[in-house]
Image (cartoon, rainbow, N blue to C red):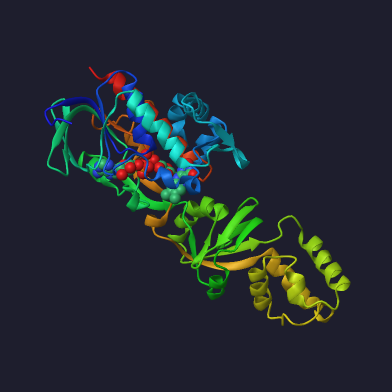
Amino acid sequence: MKSSQVYDIAVLGAGPAGSLAAIRAGAFNKKVILIERNNSIGRKMLLTGKGRCNLTNTASLEAFVEKFGKQGNFLRSAFFAFSNCDLMQFLESNGLRLKIERQGRVFPVTDSSCSVIDVLRKCLDDNKVELLFNKRLLSVKRESDFFRLELDDKASILSKKLILATGGVSYKKTGSSGDGLLIARKLGHSVIALSPALVPLKAGEEWIKELQGVSLKNVSIAFGYGKKKIKSPVGEVMFTHFGISGPLVLDLSQTIVGILKEHKELSLFIDLKPGLTDKQLENRLLRDFSAKGNTKLKKIMVGYLPRRLSAVLIELSGISPEITASQVTREQRQSIKNLLKALALTITRALPIEEAMVTAGGIFAKEINPRTMESKIIRGLYFAGEIIEGAAASGGYNLQQAFSTGYLAGEKAALCVE
Ligand SMILES: Cc1cc2nc3c(=O)[nH]c(=O)nc-3n(C[C@H](O)[C@H](O)[C@H](O)COP(=O)(O)OP(=O)(O)OC[C@H]3O[C@@H](n4cnc5c(N)ncnc54)[C@H](O)[C@@H]3O)c2cc1C
């Protein structure tokens, strides 16, 4: 990079949003520079989908819109401009084979995020995007028709258009520390309060520590506060040393974070046997306890639950694990059934935003033109990706948001360069 050079488009941040924006802008033969503080692209993307990169979902456009709640409609044009099908076709036409897993989640067949990053890197080269690594943007000044970008090595560059794709503030070690939000604020944009989304929750119970690492499939959860209840579908949760995580918890966590602002704590009930009604479970316990009268309770319960959890459940019921099934009274059996249908935890708070997978909040969407991703406040300034307010549940929706808004911003910025 020569400091005297003027670029048509400068893209800030080489995550999925910035990379796609630069690739798309480059396809119009514009002079594009992609600036990244790390020494490579997609540092956060490497971690996605537990290293496997759940890059999108096969859901309909309407489902995508719905997943983003209040911000869904704002994203409609971006999802239309570069849909999940477009993304899959783009990746496949560049040699990446994809596969679809449960609930429409799309992954590369390699099961490695690196292979998605490799495609982006190749396309950046193909479209002659100049890459500037190990440079952190510190500030932006508007100078007549240009943006002057000041970097941490005191160099500065000029660009006609600027795309801010610096992400949110979660997992700061990946480079997403909120710089773009500060820069946008200085340029006159409003930032909607940042809060964690897709975040594990802390529980007050001491016994939770004994369950660290225990994962439960085919359970459902319900959060209770006041007289209200929020229920999940059937899915997976995981106990941690501080509380609870796993897809069911993460997906509801954004709502729970909001509720925790008004309620000091709330209850979480885990239905460990959602496939059985109370009556069916009661009958099954009765049948089992009668058939295995001489078997110790602790042995029978292992047939119902993972060993560590069954021990905790018996302890919570107050029954001796050493008694035989025939010694269990009707009331005791009821109490076991109740725990199996609604194991209660007290949720005290969410982990901090740093440990959330996604940042909710960000640049106020009403200040961005949804058809172009251009700022309504500063002409020539565009936004893409997680820097924009809003977040979705897990399933590949957040990465698709980054790709779609990146694509749209890159295209519109390129088409507006004089
Ligand atoms: C553990 C984890 C797992 C996840 N799994 C999934 C998943 O499976 N599916 C899914 O859809 N989503 C997943 N997500 C969310 C997804 O990673 C994000 O939504 C996505 O990365 C956002 O893309 P982005 O390009 O907007 O921002 P980022 O990926 O955060 O990229 C922003 C880039 O900007 C750079 N940058 C920031 N400030 C500056 C500066 N001043 N100068 C230069 N460069 C700068 C950063 O270094 C970074 O590379 C996951 C997130 C985490 C943390």
Which residue is at the front of the view, 5 or 143?
5
Which residue is at the front of the view, 359 or 304?
304
Q: Quadrant of the C terminus?
A: top left
Q: Classify 396 as above or below 8.
A: below
Residue at x 14% of width, y 36% of height: 156
x, y percent for residue 2: 14, 30
Residue 148 shown left or right of residue 124 in the figure: left
Which residue is at the front of the view, 286 or 46?
46
Which residue is at the front of the view, 103 or 48?
48
Residue 12 in view here? yes
Residue at x 27% of width, y 20% of height: 30
Residue 95 shown left or right of residue 182 in the figure: right
For ligand 1, give the image quadrant.
top left
x, y percent for residue 91: 47, 28
Q: Quadrant of the N terminus?
A: top left
Residue at x 29% of width, y 44% of height: 38
Residue 295 shown left or right of residue 132 in the figure: right
x, y percent for residue 108: 52, 36
Q: Classify 243 as above or below 298.
A: above
Residue 180 in view here? no
x, y percent for residue 236: 61, 54
Q: How many marks?
A: 0
